[in-house]
Image (cartoon, rainbow, N blue to C red):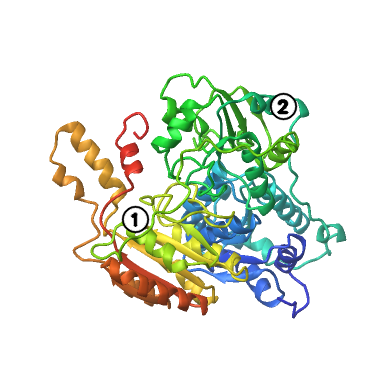
Amino acid sequence: MTATVETQWISDAIAIALRDTLELEFVALNPGASFRGLHDSLVNVGGPTMLVCLHEEHAVAIAHGYAKVTERPMAVILHSNVGLMHGSMAVYNAWCDRVPMVILGGTGPMDANKRRPWIDWIHTTTDQAAIVRAYTKWDDQPSSLPAALDALVRANNIARTEPCGPTYVCLDANLQEARIETPPHPRHLRVHVGSQRAVPQASEVARVVEALKHARHPVIVVGRVSRSERSWNERIQLVESTGAMVVTDLKTPSSFPTMHPAHVGVPGYFLDEAAKAALRNADVIVSLDAIDLAGVLKQAFGNDDPGALIVSITLDRYAARGWTMDMGGVARVDIDIAAHPDAVVPLLLAEFSDAEPIVSRSNGATSLPERTRPESGPVTMASLGRAIHEALGERQFTLTRVPLGWVGDLIPFVDPFSYLGYDGGGGVGSGPGMAVGSALALKDAGRLPVAILGDGDFLMGCTALWTAVAHEIPLLVVVANNQSYYNDVVHQERVARDRNRPLENKWQGQQITAPTVDIVGMARAQGAVAFGQVSDAADLPRTLAEAIEKTQQGAVCIVDVLVAAEYGASLTKVLSQESVAP
């Protein structure tokens, strides 16, 4: 936005700094009086493009989805303590997912004499950042313009430094609305520090190279890595040069081609039997920032010693806190490298540059099963996945989310943007907002953004779609609607079995029926184009084709699909095991 009036107020300088110093393109917000000064400046002086949201949690989720694609922060503004509490779940997701984000907050005047009766008192807190301090990287509450500009630069730098995460800067409403008495020093308007990447020690790299050169059955477990096409190709080259097998999951974005002969097992939220077998047979296991490496090993080995040499490449130790246990268990590691995997893989690859590609030893499938006849009848998760894959055809696409019941081989991942992973915190309701943010980042990329959401996730966050419609962000959402919170049905069945209670009662308190929610009506209420309810698999190809066409024309489209209340076999098995899921 181009400046239209003279910079006179402290909030004017803050808005300009967000745009020019931090180079933030967008700011997501739900309007609030605690930042009315900054809001005025964004409109009249210029700053990042505003994305108006209907809920603070959506604002944070949109920034989260945007960062998963771009690996850059978006600004978010949350109104006072109440808006921060609304958005706190989404902040936790961003923390667990290690994505950069710069969050600004407003608070009522810290000078009690300047507070309006009632409202400013209940919207003023003495330590507002305490609400999210346990799951943000840094926070500040500056009390002058120079301090505010310094805080913004620091917040941006820390958010973008690996391991990335959200930062929070609280701005006193009185500070925002004060006149600029002394123009800030020019250095404040020029400072911009990019992220730095840690480099491992040469001796550590040499130990890993030596281990891989002598390994007979190496396995690489890929977790948090970047969206870089170059890094994607380097991982493939390393795998082919070492003859390693590869294990990936659905918690993290696509990191390796799932149809590659070296990819073993089906990506899921937990390991399948093929992946476990590969790990049990391995003599060297290399973790590229796998989420909860100790949990990965426990799934394969239980409490037994793996026997293999374990290499862990991660910066996650620098994100460990006492309040949240999102760092996972303590894994027994032989070589521990504190660096981002993308910084280590090319160093390893350089030592195998002359090696002949080794034929993979994987037993994983390398082709999708052929369809022998058109499917009809009730829709299952498998038939829905196949229908979506066929409807996408040769188009470039990005799956922004898949539901917990998804089976990872239904749609192959062929590049770093095929799939964007889960939300980090493992809650419900983030899917729509994150899909909007991802679609915004992909708007001019020539890719079709597709979110496959459970009905519970959709219903909690569907008003986020209003922002996509209002800001003309094309997006396709397919709702896998089993009319229940089926995740907990599995848990209730297990408890019922353990306690010898009636299994037929497992549905009580889980079903979203009587009345049945009108998902199509809710989608249309946000201005989206809605299709459904589709209950016969034979109707999916036509409906999906029409929805894809509308989305490519610029629409936000929702397809409501009634699916059988089922889960992926691997997930059901894991959720029923006491040793893995409490």
Counting every numbered tag in the picture gives: 2
Q: Position of residue 90 (x, y in %)?
A: 49, 53
Residue marked by disc 1: 382
Q: Where is residue 65 shown, x and y percent of the image?
A: 55, 58
Q: Is residue 2 visible?
A: yes
The tag on residue 465 is none
* Quadrant including the C terminus: top left
Q: Are marks 1 and 2 in contact (CB under 8 Å)?
A: no
Residue at 43% from the left image edge and 78% from the top image edge: 527
Using a 10 Å C-alpha cutoff, classify the residue at mark 2 as few (fewer than 14 neighbours), some (14 to 19) or many (20 or more). some
The answer to whether 329 appears left or right of 12 in the picture is left
Q: Nearer the viewer, mark 1 or mark 2?
A: 1
Give SS at disc 2.
helix
Q: Amino acid at mark 1?
A: Ala
229 and 99: which one is in front? Answer: 229
Asked whether residue 104 is in view, the answer is no
Q: Residue at x 53, y 33 (%)?
A: 322
Q: Which mark is residue 204?
A: 2
Task: Determine the residue positioned at 73% across, 59% down.
Answer: 22
Above or below for 176 versus 412: below
Q: Residue at x 41, y 57 (%)?
A: 429
Whole-number angstrom distance, CA of label 1 to CA of label 2: 44 Å
